[in-house]
Amino acid sequence: MHPAPSVIIFTTLSGLGFGLLFWLGLGLLAPAGWVALAFFAVAYLLAVGGLMASAFHLGHPERALKAFTQWRSSWLSREAWLSVAALSIMAIYGAGLVFWGVAWTPLGWLGAGSCLGAVGATSMIYTQMRTIPRWRTWLTPALFIALSLGGGALLAGQITFAVILLPVAAVVQIAWWVRGDRALARSGTDLETATGLGHIGTPRAFEPPHTGTNYLTREFIHVVGRRHAQKLRAIAFVLGYLLPILLLGLPLPLPHVAAALAVLSHITGILASRWLFFAEAEHVVGLYYGKRVA
Amino acid sequence: MTNLPTSTQRKLGLVIDLDTCVGCHACVISCKGWNTENYGAPLSDQQPYGADPSGTFLNRVHSYEVQPDRGAAQLVHFPKSCLHCEDAPCVTVCPTGASYKRVEDGIVLVNESDCIGCGLCAWACPYGAREMDAAEGVMKKCTLCVDRIYNQNLPEEDREPACVRTCPAGARHFGDFGDPDSHVSQLTAARGGFDLMPEQGTKPVNKYLPPRPRDSLDQTDVLAPFLEPVAQETKGFVAWLDRALGAL
Ligand code: SF4
Ligand code: SF4
Ligand code: SF4
């Protein structure tokens, strides 16, 4: 799949923003006044900024409201509803903390639940695609939610939770990568089923329909070399998981600086891993064009 | 509405005969010609005469080489347009309701004034049957020429899809698969019509007919033995040249 910057930024930042809102809503930390305002400002910048970035992906962003209509069948529509619900509920809860210094606990929990729901719905948009075997696994929502919770805990200063959840996310990430490398081969879809010509012999793409590119080849066929993929995975793993865990877990001087570095490193690493999430994902339409990862 | 109808009154679709398709791409051109000036937004081209031409098409023809265990390889031309699936995953993912499957005849269409151009339906289609138009920012797909097949202003013989009407080899057939007596149903039954990627669970309406087995002669040309080189050993000057060049 084409790794569109808008979607990479959207999934990474809004995942983090909703993760931070989750911890705020849970009520383990109840900042008041200016501190609360700062926490909520960061969370909203991330979550809303991410959602705005995703709008750049649309051909007609001015019709975006129509995306709320099909919640019965479409995960994208459900994501729209859950995001708005989470942002609205948490805005009211946040106002309580900022202006009156009160935590309306049930409201916070409801908001926290909606935040998880929004992240889950985002992940289901990808998970539901039978056409992209690498994504079609329960590990995908597990990864998105673990990352959102772990990254959110990191931002919320919930160090204890962060050093538990980030390693969990790291394990899910590795499992997701390992499974993903065999997913297309295991899915049972290959050029023989795509053309139905397997009963005659071994089919091979001989000539594409056009000599140039088209929407399908640009959007769905993106071949990353294995060597680059392994390097990027290593970078994503070290920056996204390992370094933040070490920075938080080790008794370092200047804990605030260490925490800030951990956040930066985590975001960079997760951006790299999200780039791979799209770039490495093979859509079965690539078979018709004779394109597989080298 | 992006819920799929539980059943449709008719199941209109195409039979594509891989045995007779000669790969002339006439259906590609007639499809583009009809659909760029009728239903919905035109099918735009980007840099059609430039270095990197690209454009929107609703029907494309691939070519595959099939190598059997024994004997010569076979070339198969492979037209592909929307298969108007019964369990169309492109419809259920649509967040706006722009993508829908018609109850009356099973045609899968996009309401372009509702489409936000999110592209999700193209992600969900395993066959590459949907293309986002780069100029309009909306999703385009085969309409089964819905504006021809019911069009009372056209002469009777033109009330079929443009690609079917134009195919010089008669490799495309249009009809109702819901009716077991229709000629498309009969053709599918007689020739062993099959689904593309059945494991994807889309239940395509369009069917493909397999290429018939080819003759397998041991040699491809009866004149071939007479074309063997006459002189196997070289003599004289040519032999000297042969040795001299070989020694280099
Ligand atoms: S071929 Fe693709 S676009 Fe057409 S109905 Fe099936 S899934 Fe949808
Ligand atoms: S691109 Fe248009 S038709 Fe396709 S899913 Fe998005 S809104 Fe629906
Ligand atoms: S039925 Fe019409 S829209 Fe569909 S491929 Fe044929 S000519 Fe194109």
Image (spheres, coloured by chain):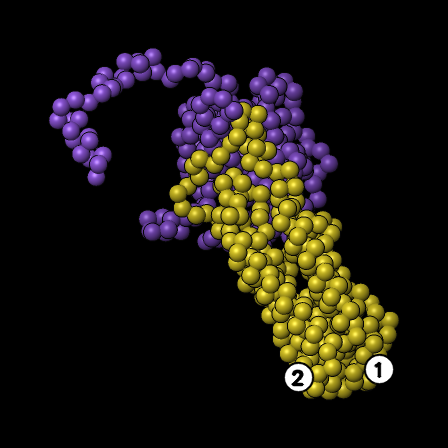
Chain colours: A yellow, B purple
Residue drawn 32% across the image and 48% down it? B49
Query: Residue A166 bears which disc, if any?
Result: none
Residue A159, image x and y in percent? 76, 76
Q: Secondary structure at mark 2?
A: helix
Q: Residue at x 31, y 14 (%)?
A: B225
Chain under callout 2: A
User: Are the residues flagged by discs 1 and 2 in contact, CB closer than 8 Å?
Assistant: no
Question: Badge 1 sits on which subunit?
Answer: A
Tell me, yes or no, whether dots 1 and 2 are on the same chain. Answer: yes
Few, some or many residues within 10 Å of mark 1 (<14, 14–19, 20+): some
Q: Residue furthest left?
A: B237
Q: Secondary structure at mark 1?
A: loop
**Residue located 73% across and 78% down the image:** A250
Going by the numbered disc 1, the residue's amino acid type is: Val
Q: Which residue is mark 1?
A: A102
- Rendered image quadrant of residue A122: bottom right
Q: Work out whether residue B223 or residue A19 is closer to the camera in this orientation and state it.
A: B223
Is residue A110 in view?
Answer: yes
